[in-house]
Image (cartoon, rainbow, N blue to C red):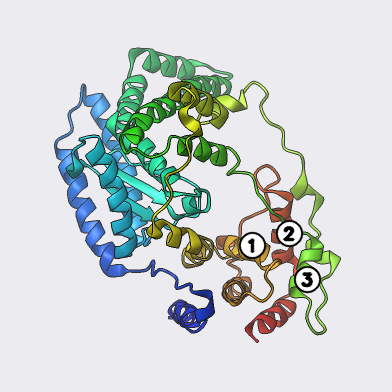
Amino acid sequence: MKHSLLLFFFFSFFYAAGQNSFSPLDTLSHTCAAKLKVEYVKKFKNINNNREYETSAQKNVIKEIYGGLQEDFIEKIDNNNFICDSELNNYLNDLMNEILTSNSIDKDIYRILLSKDPDVNAYNTGDGTVVVNYGLFLAVDNEDELVFVICHEVGHQFLDHLKKDVEAYARLSTSEEMIKKTKEIKKQKYGKASMATNLLKNIRYQSYSERREKEIEADSIGLVFYRQTKRSPAAAISLLQKLDVSDTEKDSLVMEDYKKIFEKGDFVVKQRYFEQEESLFQTYTKDERFNADSLKSHPDCSTRITLIKDYLDNKFLESSMGSSTGFEEIKRNSVYQNLFNMFSAQDYGISLYEALKLYKYELEDPVLKNIIYLNLVKIYDSRKNYTINRYVPKHDNLRNTKSLNRFISFISNIKKTDLETIINNFKS
C-alpha cells in the first residue's frame, strides 16, 4: 500500500510539473501482464509439445534447459518487467514489421516486447520473441540504429541460434566422451576439484567461442535484413561504436558533488561517510590461465565493425535517413523513464546513484529532485528494516567503479538522522 502511494505521488508530481513535459509510462499494468502471461504459457506449451529429440538422455537435458528459460520469462512477466504502452508497443511493432516485410519473413513467428531493464541491450528468446531493453534508448541516437539492433536479433532467430546452442550442449553433456571423463574424475582419490575445474574450463572455452561466432553470423544476416529496409548502412557502424563503450561509466560522483547536492542549512557532508574497511577494497586476483577475452559472449565491437565495413565496401559513410517523431519522443524521455523504471523495479540504490549524477548539473530540475526524494525514502526504510542489501548493491572492487563504491559507502555510513535531514531537504 505504501509503495502504491509513492507511485501515485510520483505520477501526480509529473502531471503537475508540466514544464518538464515528461509523464512516466505505467510499467505496472497488471491487466496487460495477465494477458501476456496467458499468451506465453500457451505458446510455451505448444512449443514443448512439438519439440523433437535425438535421444531420451538429450530429451531430459533439453527439457530442463527450456523449462528454466521459460520459467524465468514467466517470472519476468509476473514481476511486470515488460512495459505495456499501446503507442510505444505499436511503434516497435511497426519497426519489426518493416524488417519482416522487407525480407519476406513470416510475421506470425515473431513478437517484439519492451523491457524496463536499464541495461543497454536487446535479446532473442529463441521462440520468435525479440526483447528490447528500455536502457537501449540511452545509447541509440537515431531510429536506424534501433532498427539495426532489431535486425541483429531477428538474425539470431532466423538462424535458430538458441535452439542449436541447447542441442549442442545436450549432445556434449550426454556424449560417451563426457560420461567417460566424468566417471574418471569420480574415481580419483585426489585432485577431483582440479580435474573438474579444467574440464569445465574446456567446455566454457568451446561454448563462448561458438557463441562469439554466432554473434558475427547474426551481424551478417542482420545486415542483409537491414539493407533491405533501405535505411542507412552508417547506423550499423555508429551503433557498434557506441556499444563498444557502453559498459564504461561516463560520469562519477566525488565528495565535492555530494557537498554540492546535499549540503543545505546546518547539514555538512563529512569525510567519514566515505570511509570503508580496507578488507573490502582488496585487490582481486584473476586466474591467469584464463584468457579473459575468450570469455566474452560477444566478440569485440572493433572486430565486428571491421567485418561490417568490409561487407559494406566503404558505403558505410552514407548518412542516417533520420528518425520518426515516435523515436524522438522516446529518446527525449529515456533518461527520466529509465530512472523511473529502476525505481519501480525496486533498484533504489542504482536509481538514486544515476539520478544524482544528473542532478549535480541540474540542481533545479524538479523531476530529478523528486526521483532522488522517493529513492531516499525507500533507502531510509530499508535501513530501518535492515533490508538495505536488497535494494543497494554491495561493494565490489572488481566490477564496481570507484565512484559507485564511494556511493555505497555513503549510503551505508551516513546516520539515519542525517538521512532524515536530507530527505526533508528534498521534500521541501
Residue 24 relative to residue 394: left or right: left
Determine whether the residue tagged by mark 1 lies in a helix, strand or loop. Answer: helix
Q: CA distance from mark 1 to mark 3?
A: 15 Å
* Residue marked by disc 3: 260
Number of other residues with Cα within 10 Å of mark 1, as a class: few under 14, some 14 to 19, many 20 or more: many
Q: CA distance from mark 3 to mark 2?
A: 11 Å
Q: Is the residue under label 3 in contact with that under label 1 (CB below 8 Å)?
A: no
Q: Earlier in the sequence, mark 2 or mark 1?
A: 2
Number of other residues with Cα within 10 Å of mark 2, as a class: few under 14, some 14 to 19, many 20 or more: some
Query: What amino acid is at disc 3?
Result: Lys
Q: Earlier in the sequence, mark 1 or mark 3?
A: 3
Query: What amino acid is at disc 1?
Result: Tyr
* Residue marked by disc 1: 353
| Quarter of the rendering occupied by the C terminus | bottom right
| Quarter of the rendering occupied by the N terminus | bottom left
The numbered disc on residue 253 is 2
Residue 241 relative to residue 329: left or right: right
